[in-house]
C-alpha cells in the first residue's frame, strides 16, 4: 500500500484506509468523534471512522463553532448510561 503524507504529517486520502471518505456521517459516528477525538487523537479516530484527519479536523471545527460538539459528546454519555 502506497501511503503519502501531507506537509503536516497527516496521511493523504487513501481509499483502502479512508473507506467512508465523502459519505455522510452518521449520528453515531458524530457522537464517537466528539467523545474520543481529544482522548485518542486524530490519527486513531481517522482509522476508526475511515476518514482523513483533515476532514475530521474540519468537522470538529464546524461542530464547535455551531455548538453541536458538546451536544454530541453528551449524547454518547447518554448511550453509555443505558
Image (cartoon, grey):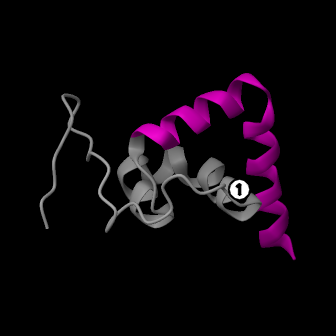
In which quadrant of the rendered view does residue 23 lie? bottom right
Q: In the rendered view of the protein, which quadrant contains the N terminus?
A: bottom left
- Residue 80 horizontal/vertical position (percent): 77, 71
Q: How crowded is mark 1: few (under 14 residues within 10 Å), some or many (20 or more)?
A: many
Q: Which residue lies furthest to the bottom in this view?
A: 82
Residue at 82 percent across and 56 percent down: it is 75
- Residue 42 horizontal/vertical position (percent): 42, 46
Position of residue 11 in the picture relative to residue 46 (left or right) = left
Secondary element at image label 1:
helix
Residue that numbered label 1 is attached to = 31
In which quadrant of the rendered view does residue 77 lie? bottom right
Query: What segment is highlighted magenta in the picture?
Result: 54-82
Position of residue 14 in the picture relative to residue 21 (left or right) = left
Q: Which residue lies furthest to the top in this view?
A: 65
Task: Say if the magenta span includes residue 20.
Answer: no
Q: Which residue lies furthest to the left in this view?
A: 2
Residue at 71 percent across and 61 percent down: it is 26
Amino acid at each position: 500500500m502506497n501511503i503519502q503524507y501531507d506537509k503536516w504529517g497527516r496521511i493523504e486520502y487513501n481509499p483502502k484506509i479512508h473507506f467512508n471518505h465523502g459519505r455522510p456521517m452518521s449520528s453515531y459516528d458524530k457522537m464517537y468523534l466528539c467523545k474520543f477525538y481529544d482522548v485518542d487523537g486524530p490519527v486513531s479516530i481517522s482509522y476508526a471512522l475511515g476518514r482523513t484527519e483533515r476532514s475530521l479536523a474540519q468537522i470538529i471545527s464546524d461542530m464547535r463553532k455551531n455548538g453541536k460538539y458538546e451536544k454530541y459528546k453528551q449524547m454518547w454519555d447518554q448511550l453509555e448510561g443505558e
